Amino acid sequence: AGNAAVRGTDYRVSVEGVTMRTEVVTGAVNIANATGQVTAQALQGTVAQSDRGPVTPIALLPSPSLAGLPDTIERLPIAWPITALPGASSYRTQLATTTEFSALLPDEVTDTARMRVRKTEDGTYALRVRGIDAQGLEGLSAQRMLVIHTQPEPPLLIEPAPEAAVTAPRPD
């Protein structure tokens, strides 16, 4: 679909079939193919297809807010809601053992504004979440550390129901 040429730049390139998406975080990237070329600056992205030139770069979505997420997760799976980003059609959640994200554990895309982790071992992890727009361009990342401590599993309350009062002198 095209070539991306860079130097000293933080960017992402993904290819799906005949479509190439380029997202520039810092610096600039020149994207070219046989039918045209554009330069995407920092905080911009573009889409190129093998039969047409790259589209004019557009602004990337801002990073989502991870405020309100707990520091420690005690039960899995989780699907914590995050504040929806205007213009986002889906969200990517990534978990890794280091802040470099060189080895991703779960890497999941959801259609709703939520941070999701299904299953992983206890430990301290780097969490990264970003919105994805209608063109498939991924926005800026929100990142933080997260502790998963699910073992032993905390007890599950069966009775009494939440907010219920127990009046028996010696409850079961």
Image (tube, rainbow, N blue to C red):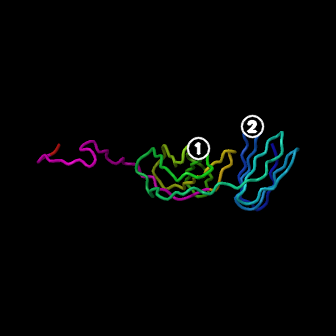
Q: Secondary structure at mark 2?
A: loop
Disc 2 crowd rating (10 Å Cα; few below 14, some 14-19, many 20+) is few
Disc 1 crowd rating (10 Å Cα; few below 14, some 14-19, many 20+) is some
Quarter of the N terminus within the rendering: top right
Task: Give the amino acid at mark 1.
Answer: Val
Disc 1: which residue: 109
Labelled disc at residue 17 = 2
Task: Give the amino acid at mark 2.
Answer: Gly
Q: In x, y percent, where is residue 102?
A: 63, 52
Is residue 13 positioned above or below 26 on the image? above
Please provide the residue range marked out in magenta.
141-170
Q: In x, y percent, where is residue 124?
A: 49, 56
Q: In x, y percent, where is residue 61?
A: 65, 54
Number of dots carrying numbers? 2
Within the magenta stretch, is there residue 145?
yes
Within the magenta stretch, is there residue 149?
yes
